[in-house]
Amino acid sequence: MNSPKPRNPKESKKTENTNKPKAQTKKNNLITESSFETTNFPKKKKQQKNNKIQNEGKKDKDKDKEGTKITKKSFNSGKQSDKHYLQSKWTMWVDGFTSSKKWGEDLTRIFDFETLEDFWALYNNLCTVLELKSGANFRLFKYGIKPEWEDEHNEKGGRWSLKLEQSGEELESIWLNTMLSMIGEHYKPSEEICGAVMSKRRGTDRISLWTKTSDQQETQESIGKKWKQEINLEKLFGPTTITYVGHKQFQGRLKNNRRFQANYQV
């Protein structure tokens, strides 16, 4: 695929949120695509020092073995009764923060959330993608789906991939809008979406959107086109092609050290 060259992020205009119904509370506060626009959410802001973290495990799990800070500060996302529930529950995973050479050894589940407020509490306290060290990954997947090819929800699927060279601030914007479009159920059918991965690498960063069934061409191409719209890809970089590869094809490439042909491209 073509590796897009960055433009000035000021050139891209944010989409206006028009005629969008306000979210309701409690039973009527389910977040759907019509409830919000991905580009109109609040920007990151500092949290108060006396907030408490709500992730699982030990107090020091927000640091890797080498001391790299994954979360910025402890946080609290507010009263449960004031929250707006998403259609699906999600889990944020991280890996690549240690010197482990074997994949999966440092894969860590850091937070589960099922409300919009909990998502923002998580996002506002994670380090930015620009602060990630080379080799590290953020992996946001639906609750119950492990971010690996062998998981039963992923084994017959594949991923749309976007590679970015020296993307700067655009990388943060694309990753954020990818997450928001997933938790907002913007893709049809929503059951096809498994999760997304942000991979920090030297020189070239990669964001991928994982889906459930790689052999459904019409569905996958529709999702790929929708993803490009959600992340404002062509507004940022001009005409850009993204490719879809099934996990089995990708595994075969790695095993046999050969080139592979993409299943689809849009």
Image: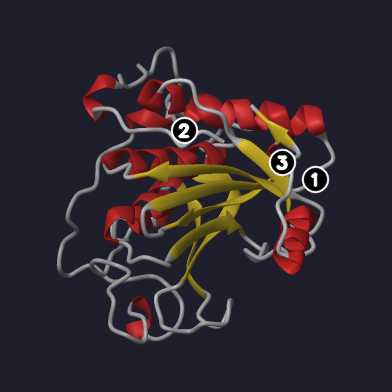
Tell us which disc is closer to us: 1 or 3: 3
Q: Label 1, label 2: how many angstroms apart (C-alpha)? A: 34 Å
Amino acid on which disc 2 is placed: Gln
Residue 99 versus residue 186 in the image, above or below: below
Examine the image and state in which quarter residue 67 appears.
bottom left
Tell us which disc is closer to us: 1 or 2: 1
**Nearer the N terminus, badge 3 or badge 2?**
2
Q: Identify which residue is drawn at 38% across, 70% down.
A: 54
Label ID, residue 262: 3
Q: Position of residue 65 (x, y in %)?
A: 36, 87
**Which quarter of the figure is the C terminus placed in?**
top right
152 or 217, which is in the foreground? 217
Label ID, residue 24: 2
167 or 146, which is in the foreground? 167
Secondary structure beneath dot 1 equals loop
Q: Position of residue 170 (x, y in %)?
A: 32, 38
Amino acid on which disc 3 is placed: Ala
Secondary structure beneath dot 3 equals loop
134 or 123, which is in the foreground? 134
Q: Which residue is mark 1?
A: 213
Give the crowd class for mark 3: few <14, some 14-19, many >=20 residues within 10 Å: some
